């Protein structure tokens, strides 16, 4: 059994209606509980919960400190390639976007590593487009072999792979694997992924199951906020998280909250989520699952990122470059999307420290990996 069976028990329109019709009483009941259900989560992300945001934030802060202490894990994304065979209407790397394509060579990878290490990072997230003929498992394994001596913690965000391939990445030393469903609305998914292997909705939906079967240390999931109704997408994502934790209980989990951002050739949608609503969503996730890691990227504004440090976030990127070679090799290559928080890691570390929190440059030491 995979998550597909759970997914098919629900109807998108019915879920959306259920969330919209939640009442203040539903919200109060959820806030009064020690452990909440997906139905309670639906109440906390509903419009009825917005007047309770302060109470949600207080509870989220307390739960986060109880589980994670006053720490923020920091990481740097390292883009290895912008080559991609998919057409995705929201991504600057889309196959139909006539841009300069680049995949880093061994020497270029090492140059990027040197630049990222100088910034102080010991946790790196490797990112590529989805081009199986160019950036495939052999390429990833080679890149990991080059990078591993310099970082205690390597995460990967690439195209969905087979279970055996995930097992190879795990064996090579990958700590966590991230894969986002983009949207859980099957019809909307077809519209924004008209061509390419990524257009296979259920293959992508079952990817975290294949990762779980590979015994990877941590799985990261999420929805791209802005492709469809953020509340309904987030409910399905919460269901996905609950399912994965029950089935692959020895694995750690993280949830990310990427909001769609401007990029070359991107068609922005009208499915907007405000800062206040994003805070509501983050707090709802923390109340729903006190143990899950919540990650916030540099897509967000400095003001929002500053405020979320104390209210539920546990992992944040800093000084990010979203183009291959962006740190040292080719700073002018095309970005996947525009970042909003352009502060240096040093500047952001000061902000974290000023709020009484400890910035952590890794959450795993290579001594524990043998």
Image (tube, rainbow, N blue to C red):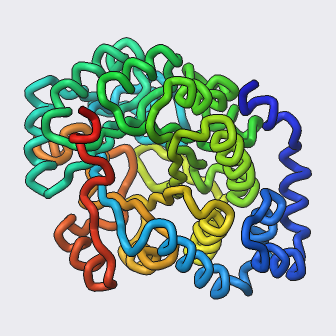
Q: Is residue 222 visible?
A: yes
User: In the image, residue 105 lies at what x, y percent?
Assistant: 15, 24
Quarter placement of the N terminus: top right
From this view, report whether residue 265 is shown above or below residue 202.
below
- Image quadrant assignment for residue 111: top left
From this view, report whether residue 244 is shown above or below residue 144.
below
Q: Residue at x 38, y 26 (%)?
A: 170
Q: Is residue 300 left or right of residue 235?
A: left
Q: Residue at x 50, y 59 (%)?
A: 294
Q: Residue at x 23, y 72 (%)?
A: 349
Quarter placement of the C terminus: top left
User: In the image, residue 296 lies at what x, y percent?
Assistant: 44, 61
User: In the image, residue 199 lies at what x, y percent?
Assistant: 62, 26
From this view, report whether residue 12 is shown above or below residue 273.
above
Q: Is residue 47 left or right of residue 278?
A: right
Q: Is residue 19 left or right of residue 360?
A: right
User: In the image, residue 201 lies at what x, y percent?
Assistant: 67, 28
Q: Is residue 229 left or right of residue 336?
A: right
Q: Is residue 323 visible?
A: no
- Image quadrant assignment for residue 287: bottom right
Figure disc tally: 0
Q: Residue at x 19, y 42 (%)?
A: 151
């Amino acid at each position: 059994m995979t998550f597909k069976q759970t997914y098919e028990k629900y109807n998108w329109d019915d879920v959306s209606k259920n969330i919209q019709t939640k009442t203040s009483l539903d919200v109060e009941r959820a806030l009064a509980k020690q452990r909440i259900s997906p139905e309670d989560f639906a109440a906390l992300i509903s419009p009825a919960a917005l007047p309770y945001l302060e109470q949600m934030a207080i509870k989220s802060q307390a739960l986060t400190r109880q589980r994670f202490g006053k720490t923020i894990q920091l990481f740097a994304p390292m883009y290895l390639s912008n080559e991609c065979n998919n057409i995705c209407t929201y991504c600057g790397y889309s196959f139909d976007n006539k841009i300069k394509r680049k995949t880093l060579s061994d020497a270029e990878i090492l140059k990027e590593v040197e630049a990222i290490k100088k910034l102080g990072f010991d946790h790196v997230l490797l990112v590529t487009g989805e081009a199986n003929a160019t950036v495939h498992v052999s390429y990833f394994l080679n890149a990991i072999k080059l990078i591993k001596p310099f970082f205690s913690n390597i995460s990967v965000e690439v195209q969905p792979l087979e279970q055996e391939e995930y097992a190879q990445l795990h064996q090579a030393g990958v700590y966590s694997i991230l894969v986002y469903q983009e949207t859980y609305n099957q019809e909307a998914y077809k519209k924004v992924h008209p061509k390419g292997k990524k257009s296979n909705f259920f293959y992508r939906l079952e990817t975290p199951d294949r990762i779980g079967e590979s015994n990877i240390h941590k799985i990261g999931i999420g929805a791209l906020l802005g492709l469809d109704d953020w509340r309904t997408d987030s409910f399905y994502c919460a269901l996905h998280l609950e399912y994965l934790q029950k089935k692959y209980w020895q694995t750690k989990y993280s949830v990310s909250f990427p909001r769609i951002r401007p990029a070359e050739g991107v068609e922005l949608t009208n499915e907007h989520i405000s800062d206040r609503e994003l805070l509501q969503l983050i707090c709802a996730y923390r109340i729903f699952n006190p143990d899950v890691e919540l990650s916030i990227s540099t897509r967000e504004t400095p003001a929002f990122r500053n405020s979320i440090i104390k209210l539920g976030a546990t992992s944040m990127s800093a000084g990010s470059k979203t183009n291959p070679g962006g740190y040292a090799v080719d700073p002018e290559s095309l970005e996947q999307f525009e970042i909003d928080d352009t502060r240096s890691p040093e500047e952001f570390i000061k902000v974290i420290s000023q709020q009484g929190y400890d910035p952590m440059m890794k959450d795993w030491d290579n001594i524990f990996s043998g």
